[in-house]
Image (cartoon, grey):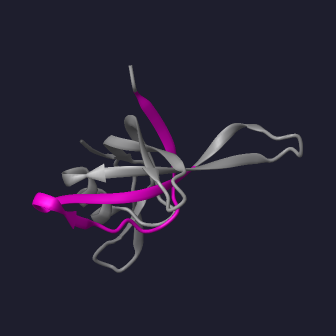
Amino acid sequence: MNSVILVGRLTQNPEIQVVDDNKKVTTIILAVNRNFKNPDGIYETDFIRCILWNNVAATTTEYCRVGDVVGIKGRLQTSKYTDENDKVHYVTDVIAERVTFLSSNKKKNNDDEEKEDDELMDVA
């Protein structure tokens, strides 16, 4: 079984791209804190590349910004490429199948005051 669940913060604003056959794709980097401290007493962070396709990509790009917390359910995918020196490199990505927006979005009401919307949005 190939299944991954991550919760972390976006390190940059998602940007949508259109590729072959009008498919939408967004690549995000998710900062995920480890659940243990290193010998210096600091929680380290892993930066994990996630690839989102079609509706998941479009909705995430529309609603999420740098620093937002999201949950991702997906699968690992490994690819390889050969550089100009004929050395083979392997790259592992998370292919997102579902994204859940976990941050509170701040919206303006009619009085131009900020209020928090604590609803979760789940995109599959």
Q: Quadrant of residue 28?
A: bottom left
- Residue lying farthest to the bottom in this orientation: 112
**50 or 117: nearer the viewer:** 50
Image coords of residue 51 (percent x, y): 36, 51
At x 24% / y 42%, what residue is drawn? 124
Residue in the image at 26% along x and 67% along y? 17
Judging depth in this view, the residue of 81 and 7 nearest the camera is: 81
Q: Nearer the viewer, residue 91 or 53?
A: 91
Give the extent of the magenta segment.
3-31
Q: Residue furthest right?
A: 40
Residue at the extreme top of the image, as rendered? 1
Picture residue at 37% right of the left edge, 62% below the top: 64
Q: Nearer the viewer, residue 44 or 80?
A: 80
* Residue 43 locus on image (x, y percent): 75, 45
Question: Is 21 left or right of 81, judged from the image as shown?
Answer: left
Q: Position of residue 16 (x, y in %)?
A: 28, 66
Query: Seen from this angle, which residue lies furthest front?
Result: 86
Q: Is residue 124 above or below residue 65?
A: above
Question: Is 120 inside the magenta-drawn segment?
Answer: no
